[in-house]
Amino acid sequence: MIADLRKLIEAAWEDRTLLEYSEYCEAIETTIMQLDRGELRVAEPILNSWGINEWVKKAVILYFPIRQMKEIEVGPFVFYDKMKLKTNYKELGVRVVPHGIARFGAYLAKGVILMPSYVNIGAYIDEGTMVDTWATVGSCAQIGKHVHLSGGVGIGGVLEPIQASPVIIEDNVFIGSRAIVVEGVRVEKEAVLGANVVLTASTKIIDVTGPTPIEYKGIVPSRSVVIPGSYAKKFPAGEYQVPCALIIGKRKESTDKKTSLNNALRENNVAV
């Protein structure tokens, strides 16, 4: 079944005129439905790494041209879009506070809580995760179990280029207020990002806990406690401070994960 879906979607990707035929449109619709149910994912863990299902991303992109714009009424609120909104939250075991919105094609596992926030198509949010007020989870982002996305957090989305990796936030991660994670950055299990940390693919992530700095890009190692920082860089016009992120400590494995989220920040003098 999956092989058949993939074959049809790959063909439609190469030849958009095939979208005029029902079997190709039905393959796209089926793929999006399976994304919505969590039966398919844009990215999935494989051993100690992650694999990207590019054909699923292609299905998400192809979903737009086969949809028609229409008005959506939700009580007194009116929207005008191509995408349906998720429904059946009670049956899913998901708590959604008013103004929490997820598009159809995003997966929300049992125990997820959406405060007034937004989750885009293709995203995957695993059980027990909190998406706090005005946080956003972009297209195809992968969020693990028991993650806390604090108020105003921005998790970037990605559709194109097809080979680009989505943002991946692994299990038991805590992300502080107004932090931003984009461009396929991967935050490994149990890491803690302090308020206002900004991570892009090119951001230097510097471990300053030892006698010499250790530099990472695109990945935050497990249990790292991270705060915003800066370093001096020379330009033709002079030397200026450039943003970076600093790893200033590690969460202790012996500490209870839920209670240590804020404690891990406070122990390292980091604002929640």
Image: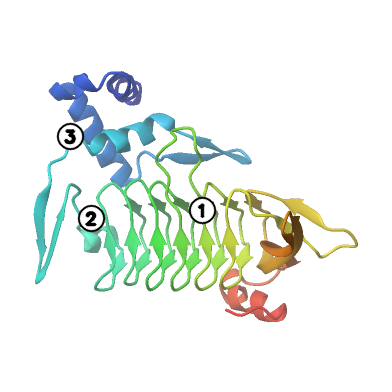
How many neighbours does mark 2 have within 10 angstroms: few (below 14), some (14-19), or many (20 or more)? some
Kind of residue sitting beneath label 1: Val
Residue 66's disc is: 3
Left or right, 137 with respect to 37, comes to: right
In the rendering, at what x and y percent does residue 58 appear?
Answer: 35, 32
**Disc 3 residue type?**
Ile
Mark nearest the camera among 3 and 2 is: 3
The answer to whether one can see residue 253 in this image is: no
Disc 2 secondary structure class: loop
Residue at the front extreme of this rendering? 237
Q: CA distance from mark 3 to mark 2?
A: 19 Å
- Amino acid type assigned to the residue bearing label 2 in the image: Lys
- Using residue 84 as the reference point, say whether residue 95 is left or right of it: right
Q: Which residue is mark 2?
A: 86
Which quarter of the picture shows residue 39?
top left
Q: Residue at x 53, y 67 (%)?
A: 179
Residue located at (61% from left, 71% from top) = 194
* First in sequence: mark 3 vs mark 1: 3
Looking at the rendered image, the quarter that the N terminus falls into is top left
**Among the two numbered marks 1 and 2 on one chain, the one whose residue lies closer to the N terminus:** 2
> Measuring 66% from the left and 81% from the top, which residue is drawn there?
266
Q: Are marks 3 and 1 in contact (CB under 8 Å)?
A: no
Q: What whole-number distance in Å separates the C-alpha atoms at marks 1 and 2? A: 24 Å
Q: Is residue 20 left or right of residue 158?
A: left
Residue at which label 1 appears: 182
